[in-house]
Each structure stands twice: as C-alpha cells, then as structure tokens.
Image (cartoon, rainbow, N blue to C red):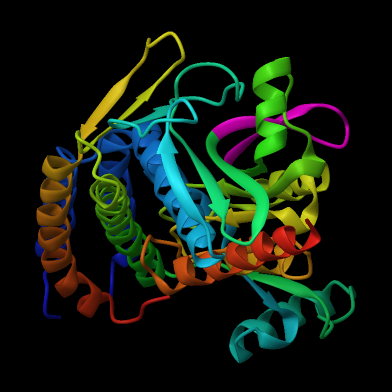
Amino acid sequence: MQESAEIYEELIRRVGERSDSLAAQIREEVARGRLVPGSKLPEGEREERQSRLAEAKLGRIGKDEMAVLPYTGDERLALLCQALLTLAQTMTESRRTLLELTTDNDLPHPRVLFTEPDETDSIEFDLPVELSNAERALGQVTNLLRPVQEEVGRWL
Amino acid sequence: MAMSRRELIDAVENALGVLTPVYRGAAAESDLYEAALFTIAVEAAVAAGGSYLITDDGRTRSSRLTFRRSPGNLWLGNFTYIVVTFPDSPRRLEIHLGVYVVGGSRVPHECDVAVIDQEEAERSRQGLVHPRRAKLVASIEAKNYAASPGIGVGRAFIGLSAELGQAKCTLAFPARRSSNLAALLAARPSECFDELLPRSPAAQRLRSHLDQKIRNWIARG
C-alpha cells in the first residue's frame, strides 16, 4: 500500500498516547528489522549491497554473514495490528484461565487481588466481569482489524 | 484499494478506543499474564499425576486468589500458592508466583513462576532464607509482550538461566519471536515459548515440558 509507512507513523503515535509500553515494544521491533542470512537477501537488495561493497573494495557478503532487512511500511502496519490483536487475546485468555482456576477449585470469590505484603498498591479483578468485557473487546477489535489485515495483505 | 487511508486509520483508532477501557495498564496486565502462566504450571503438575491444594497457608483452601504485585520473599505475606502431592511418591511440590530464588552466585533472583520442592519451601518459611536453585524444579520467566521482546530480554534470560540452572528455566511471551531472538536462544538448553497464550498450542507445549520436568524430579526422588 502506498503511504503505509506514513500511516504507521501516525498510528504508532496514537498507540503511544494510550500505552507507552505497547508503542515502545512495537517501535523496538520495527527498529531492529529482520535478521536474515546474507544469502537470503532479496536479489535486488543483495546486488545493491554487493555493489556498494565492491565499490569501496570491502569484499562480498558471505553466506554465513547476517544482514538486516528493514520492515516495509506494510510490514510495520501488519506488526502494529498484530500487536493489538495479541494484546486483546492475551487480556482475554489470561482472565479466562484465572476464572477457571477459581471455579475449578470452588473458590467462594471469583476474584484475583495483586498486592504488596503491606497491602499498599493493590489492584483487584472481578474475573467474570473482566472476562466479559475483554471478550467483547476482543470481538470488536478482531472485526475492526480484519479489513486492515486484508488491506495490508501480507502478515508476518 | 479497498480501504482509504482515513478508513484504515479510523479502524485502528477505533480498536484502540475499544481496548482502552478494558486494558488495566502494563503492570496489571503483566501480573495477570504471569498468573495465567502459574495456572499452566498447576496443570502440568496434575498431568504428572499430582493432586493439589490451592492455599494461602498450606492447610486450608484459599477463598480468593491473592498474588504479589512485585517480587518478594517466599515466607512473607499470605499469598496464594499451590501444594501438590503425588499418589506414589512422598515428594511434594509447591508452585509460587513472584518469589526470589538464590542463584549460583548466591544472589536472589525473581522467579515469575517457581516450582519448588516443598521441603525447600518449608525451610524457607521456617528459616527466613531464600529457596536454593538446587531445589528449584522449574521456573518460568514471563514477558507480557505483544511484539517480540528484543535481544536485551534474551540476554537477561540467558543470565538468569545461568544462575538458576539452564535446563530449569523457560521464557514465555504472547508475541511471535523475532528472528534475532530465535537465533540467540535456539541452541541453548533453556526453552523459549513464543506465541504463548493460555490454551494455545504453545501453552500445551509448555505444559508438557513442565510435566516432564516434574516427572523426572519425582523419579529422582
């Protein structure tokens, strides 16, 4: 897709406004690029790099060397959307698994409390409510992102 | 082009809008993910033939799940853990979330999920000393990453594994691993489980892996 790199930049900024940590994860992955053996570089890319090396008299890219391929704009968009889906799936399945642990063991309260030993900085989850909300969100996110997946065309 | 630029941006923006009220923040979502991996360790103990008690005091069943928000000493606080018994073995296990275990350098390290010989856990409670790595049966290092963790996470995991015992340590995260991380960890005895969502094929593989670790520990009894 044309302009996909620009769209990615706009979207990752919006992700960052909602969750710094999620945006940072995606940005780091994009910044790293894909590690590939020199022999697996696409033909045109390999020729271009070989040509630059030859010009500078720096040898050739060997078969055992590792190269980095930057993600294309489409691939960046795909990564971003996949990360949102993975987040929604993880939220749902974590809640579901913990709710099952409470029901399988007949715990009177289907809740999980995360706390410090002195009970400062606590957060409690009412698991049936949390699961219901997460399932609904996952369904909506999947429906919203499916057309984007089709548009981007190629998933990693 | 099926979608305009505007439509595509709106779709992702709307997805973010749907997720925001349900998402409880990075730390809380990581807590939940670690607790979900804790349940996989419990399932592995059952698969290995164990029966378990979910407890805060070692004797009575918990009324609700209570876990540490940050890593802590095993003996401190009334947190939920699992006691596992086996029909044909006197050995018992405990499964804890977020406790310190002492590594080879005598420095305590956090285990997100720790499967420990019960005698060692009891020794920890009575002596107010950290469990030792020799009595650690298995541990899971959880990284709640929706995109692949980087090399830094891989390096840290290698260091943790060297401290706690390479074959005992596993790394788990929900994202697909990058080629960089895969290459770093592929040739090591510690296992890495990517795309690990509860109830996923990766979760089944982790459960089987832990099941075997527990069976081997019982057999060494």
The quarter of the image holding the C terminus of chain A is: bottom left
Please state the total of marks drawn on the protein image: 0
Q: Position of residue B63 (x, y in %)?
A: 28, 30
Residue B146 image-quadrant placement:
bottom left
Residue placed most toward the observer, A5 or B94: B94
Q: Position of residue B182 (x, y in %)?
A: 65, 67
Residue A55 image-quadrant placement:
bottom right
Instruction: Tell me which residue sits at (53%, 71%) in the image.
Output: B205
- The residue sitting at the bottom extreme is A43
Residue placed most toward the observer, B110 or B143: B110
Instruction: Tell me which residue sits at (18%, 56%) in the image.
Output: B12
Instruction: Tell me which residue sits at (12%, 62%) in the image.
Output: A139
Side of A153 where B8 appears, left or right = left
Q: Determine whether B209 is above or below B149 in the image.
A: below
Residue placed most toward the observer, A145 or A123: A123
Q: Position of residue B71 (x, y in %)?
A: 56, 26
The quarter of the image holding the N terminus of chain A is: bottom left
B99 is within the stretch colored magenta:
yes
Instruction: Tell me which residue sits at (29%, 32%) in the image.
Output: B64
Residue placed most toward the observer, A44 or B195: B195
Magenta span: predominant SS is: strand
B152 is within the stretch colored magenta:
no
Q: Position of residue A45 (x, y in %)?
A: 62, 82
Q: Determine whether B203 is above or below B78 in the image.
A: below
- Would residue A6 be visible to someone looking at this image? no
Side of B72 where A47 appears, left or right = right
- Would residue A26 be visible to someone looking at this image? yes
Residue B119 image-quadrant placement:
top right
Stretch of the chain drawn in magenta? B98-113
